[in-house]
Image (cartoon, rainbow, N blue to C red):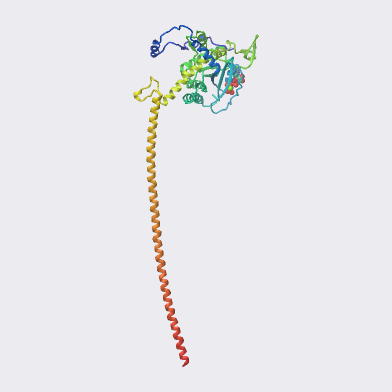
């Protein structure tokens, strides 16, 4: 029967400490200027926490989980087990030639809190022969969600509370229970995504590994994660919340959490709980000796849900946003170098962008004018050449006409001469005829 490793033997130096101490010189000096003043009576702002709760009840919360893992590794079953429901997601195709993502959104309600849960599952992950680019589609999806959020934030008619938050708040990375170590695809993907999302690595189907092997397996995985400097999500240690610190310390020490998923109810003694029934015995998911599922659920959903959402916003999203703003000309106060032309305020950026655009427009206008003049000149030249060619043809045609007219005139004159000559001959012939006739008559009379 598999079981958990003892909390402190694996990840002793693995903690994210949240402190309210000033951590920059700037903060320290500004805090010195703040005076501590006592109120003389009740004013009412202490109820702001209630206002936050009312707002949360009214608006609900969005929480988006990305499940990365090989096909059939137990992603959907674990989500069903975590949220104690049946989300009825369909199984993925095993023969896909590329990795894709399938997203489903659900409305859940616990007491009076509404949760809009989006579960994004990988499809075809690890099914290709070449797995080197398996993370690309996932990274693209994560960036697209950040980009949509930036665009909504920058939109002129935006309303922050209505921004559709599709950013990935939690990435559950399902490690195959090989008992050996991480695969190249695991390290590649986690490394590619670790600055973008809160990665929580978990060993899936932990009921398939025995207790001693699981302890060594976890150790090897964490060694590889540290050696490759993969930044996974650390459950926070908050000096203002000692009650949750212990739990978070334990959960950090259990990394990577070994989990079992199931939708079946099993009976162990008098207790009925979710579990898996085997020929040789029963695994109860709720039993912390059997797996780390309870710790995972408590740490993710009861204790650190807000931290996951907040960390996504203040760390991962801010980094994306800062890079995007830098691309369009904004700089942090600290990194801005105004001598080098870096800009600070929206007005500065607007003026700089406007003059840049004006220059481009002016350049384009001059270019268009020059091109227009060039084209007009070319057309004029073309027309002139056509005109010249037509004139040439006309002159040629005219001289041909004249030639023809002269030739006809010459022929006409020739004909006239011939007619005249003919008439003259005819006249002389007639005359001769007459004289012959009269001479004949005279001779007969004789
Ligand atoms: N032994 C064992 N089987 C599990 C566990 N979790 C899920 N399974 C079984 O594994 C099979 C696949 O589970 P799914 O939850 O559909 O896996 P999936 O990763 O969502 O699969 P695709 O979405 O198709 O990639 C089912 O038969 C589950 O009953 C587990 O913790 N242990
Ligand atoms: Mg699934």
Identify the residue shown where x is 38% and y is 47%.
Answer: 380
Along the line of sight, which residue is nearer the eye, 104 or 101?
104
Q: Quadrant of residue 86?
A: top right
The percent coordinates of residue 149 (x first, y second) are: 49, 23
Single out the residue that lies furthest toward the bottom.
Answer: 446
The percent coordinates of residue 88 (x first, y second) are: 61, 22
Single out the residue that lies furthest toward the left.
Answer: 339
Q: Left or right: where does residue 50 sit relative to residue 31?
A: right
Where 77 falls versus 382 (above or below)? above
Q: Left or right: where does residue 60 sit relative to residue 366?
A: right
Could you tell me if residue 394 is visible in this image? yes
* Quadrant into which the N terminus falls: top right
Along the line of sight, which residue is nearer the eye, 9 or 319?
319
Count of numbered tags: 0
The percent coordinates of residue 101 (x first, y second) are: 54, 25
The percent coordinates of residue 419 (x first, y second) are: 43, 74
Could you tell me if residue 180 is visible in this image? no
Quadrant position of ligand 1: top right
Identify the residue shown where x is 43% and y is 83%.
Answer: 432
């Amino acid at each position: 029967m598999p079981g958990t490793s003892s909390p402190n033997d694996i990840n002793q130096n693995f903690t994210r400490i949240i402190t309210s101490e000033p951590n920059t010189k700037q903060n320290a000096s500004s805090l010195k200027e703040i005076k501590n003043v006592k109120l003389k009576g009740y004013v009412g702002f202490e109820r702001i926490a209630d206002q936050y709760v009312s707002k949360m009840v009214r608006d609900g919360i969005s929480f988006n989980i990305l499940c990365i893992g090989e096909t059939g590794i137990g992603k959907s079953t674990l989500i069903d087990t975590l949220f104690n429901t049946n989300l009825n997601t369909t199984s993925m195709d095993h023969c896909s030639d590329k990795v894709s993502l399938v997203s489903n959104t659900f409305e859940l309600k616990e007491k009076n809190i509404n949760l809009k849960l989006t579960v994004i599952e990988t499809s075809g992950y690890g099914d290709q022969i070449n797995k080197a680019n398996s993370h690309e589609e996932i990274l693209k999806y994560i960036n697209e969600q950040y980009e949509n959020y930036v665009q909504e934030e920058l939109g002129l008619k935006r309303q922050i509370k209505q921004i559709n938050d599709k950013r990935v708040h939690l990435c559950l990375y399902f490690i195959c229970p090989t008992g050996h170590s991480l695969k190249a695809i695991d390290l590649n993907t986690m490394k590619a995504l670790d600055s973008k999302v809160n990665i929580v690595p978990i060993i899936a189907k932990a009921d398939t590994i025995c207790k001693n092997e699981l302890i060594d397996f976890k150790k090897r995985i964490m060694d590889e994660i540290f050696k490759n400097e993969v930044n996974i999500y650390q459950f926070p240690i908050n000096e203002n919340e000692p009650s949750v610190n212990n739990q978070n310390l334990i959960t950090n020490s259990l990394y990577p959490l070994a989990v079992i998923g199931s939708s079946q109810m099993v009976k162990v003694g008098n207790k009925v709980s979710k579990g898996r029934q085997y020929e040789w015995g029963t695994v109860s998911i709720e039993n912390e000796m059997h797996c780390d599922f309870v710790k995972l659920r408590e740490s993710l959903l009861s204790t650190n849900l807000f931290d996951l959402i907040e960390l996504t916003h203040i760390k991962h999203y801010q980094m994306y946003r800062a890079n995007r703003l830098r691309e369009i000309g904004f700089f942090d106060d600290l990194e801005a170098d105004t001598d080098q032309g870096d800009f600070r305020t929206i007005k500065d950026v607007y003026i700089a962008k406007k003059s840049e655009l004006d220059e481009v427009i002016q350049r384009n206008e001059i270019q268009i004018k020059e091109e227009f003049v060039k084209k007009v000149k070319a057309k004029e030249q073309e027309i002139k050449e056509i005109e010249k060619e037509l004139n040439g043809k006309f002159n040629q045609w005219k001289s041909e006409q004249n030639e023809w007219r002269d030739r006809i005139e010459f022929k006409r004159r020739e004909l006239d001469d011939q007619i005249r000559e003919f008439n003259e001959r005819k006249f002389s012939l007639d005359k001769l005829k007459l004289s012959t006739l009269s001479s004949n008559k005279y001779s007969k009379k004789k």
